[in-house]
Image (cartoon, rainbow, N blue to C red):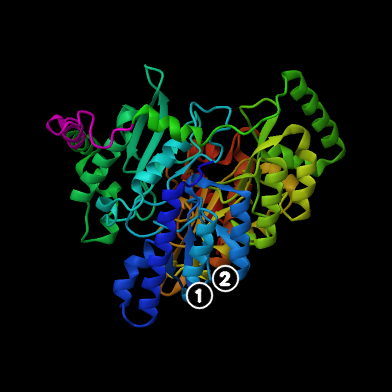
Amino acid sequence: MYQYDQHDQAFVLARVEQFRAETNRYLAGELTEDEFKPLRLQNGLYVQRHAPMLRIAIPYGVLSANQMRALAQISETYDEGYGHFSTRQNLQLNGPKLERVPDILADLARVQMHAIQTSGNCIRNVTTDQFAGVAADETADPRPYAELIRQWSSLHPEFAFLPRKFKIALTGASEDRAAVKVHDIGIALVPSQDGAMAFDIYAGGGLGRTPVIGALIKQALSQEQLLNYLEAVLRVYNRHGRRDNIYKARIKILVRALGADEFARQVQAEFDAMSADAAAGRATGPGAVSQANYDSLIQQFADPAYVTFTTEDALQMETELATRGASTPAFWRWLARSRHPHKQTGYTAITVSLKNGKLPPGDAAAAQMRLIATAAERFGFGEIRITHHQNVVLPHVRLDQLNELFKMLQSGGLASANIGLLTDIIACPGGDFCQLANAKSIPIALALQEIFEDLDELFNIGELELNISGCMNSCGHHHIGHIGILGVDKKGESFYQVSIGGMQGTNASIGRIIGPSFSEEDVPDAVERLIRFYLLVRRDAKERFVETANRLGVEPFKEAVYEHAD
């Protein structure tokens, strides 16, 4: 896990005091709302429907048990005692008082956290795979590269006021769990011929009003040139991106307008000009990164002190787990849905569901955050990850401690066996909090969780990603849900469009709308009809909903949903 050095700490503390002064000036009437807006946005502060919202950065989704406890304490001291983990691996507080925000930032700084560039037209929180560094299918750990990009992009003067917000994601595994193809820039780590890392670069992906799958614009970029190439991409975007129309300002619109080949050509020309600046003595460009720089970062993400287990040890532990599971079905179901293959023999990564039907998806009460922190210390070297699915991961759990962990999580309502199933819903806060939302997301999510609360039924339905967004900004990533639900406004009333067939990952695709929108009270029934039809027509129990939807197309599902609708 990356630890601040003295320069990091001084920088963040200075930023807190700077924002405290700006906030005091605003509250005293010395700054107008328009003057204060860019200052608050780049410190993570939004004006929401009922109160400010503060978005706290969790770089590439990694935090310590101590930091999780600090978030719990902050949520109790300054807000309503809970936090919302977002699809960007951040944490949001939905009700702090404006005058207390500088105090929150000061408390965050004490545990090496901040809210810098979590909003505004700048490079946002860099994200990656929640299993980075431990996944069995990983080529290389992407976290050191994500940290490099975080350091480079923080308060970069050239990219502080881009045409629109800008998001970067990295993956180092064969399975893309970071959704790199729907980001402004997506980076896939690949082996190079010299044994070092190289990068495939995607650009122009994104969701929102115009969902687009990113285009591959560069293959096998050397690791030395990563920052130079990213800077070239951003320079082309900064130069040509639309600033006259907020709906056409994202890089995806520019890539589409120019065409991916022409965009790639312009980026390459910019990159060549930077990397061939021999007259200035910079033959490899101003942002070239040496192997020594990488080695220093890689050391920050060294493996913890694992216990060495043999293959025979692991097999024995697996046998004991199966025996215990035979007598405790709840434990066995939880294990079936929550564990992920680990590179270290005798260990697994455990996903902790924040979708128990009592709180909105992604919400965790302060007591639950403290419980997760304690579990991380006892069973996982004090390390915690936040996922794009708004859940939490304990990345280093011994197989022989899984039963004890289950009991601890169960005591706090955190042992739901629904990871990857229908009730593991991704949802933005929607109209309950966000002033941009056209409709509420939370009531829809809670209603669906109530309808499909039977675990036998969930396991029978199988893997299914259901995503809900309260508006076209797609904070709930509805475009890439197997079932996507989008809130729309119809003459002041909330309605919901339903799409099917979306998918994130290596074969990312955008869902297709099945037909006219539904009222709030009709959405759960429409989803239930989709599920019932899928169960009738799937080839076998192994065929997932998204596979059936893509095999049959939209029309059969549309007929099944609307045939009996009033």
The residue that appears at 68% across and 31% down in the rendered structure is: 347
Apparent side of residue 378 relative to residue 137 in the rendered image (left or right): right
What is the x, y in percent for residue 389?
A: 55, 48
Residue 195 location, quadrant: top left
Q: Neighbour class for label 2 at 10 Å: few (<14), some, many (≥20)?
A: some
Q: Neighbour class for label 1 at 10 Å: few (<14), some, many (≥20)?
A: few
Q: Quadrant of the C terminus?
A: bottom right
What is the x, y in percent for residue 114?
A: 47, 57
Most extreme residue toward the bottom is: 29
Most extreme residue toward the top is: 193
The amino acid beneath tag 1 is Lys
Visible residue check, residue 334:
yes
In this rendered view, identify the residue nearer to me: 221 or 496: 221
What span is in magenta? 270-289
Would you name the residue on which mark 2 appears?
A: 78
In this rendered view, identify the residue nearer to me: 265 or 269: 269
Give the spatial CA distance, label 1 vs label 2.
Answer: 7 Å
- Asked if residue 283 is among those painted magenta in the image, a careful observer would answer yes
The residue that appears at 57% across and 57% down in the rendered structure is: 526
| CB under 8 Å between discs 1 and 2 | yes
Mark 1 or mark 2: name the one nearer the start of the chain: 2
Residue 427 location, quadrant: bottom right
Apparent side of residue 405 relative to residue 518 in the rendered image (left or right): right
The amino acid beneath tag 2 is Tyr
Q: SS for tag 2? A: helix
What is the x, y in percent for residue 176?
A: 48, 35
The residue that appears at 44% across and 67% down in the rendered structure is: 438
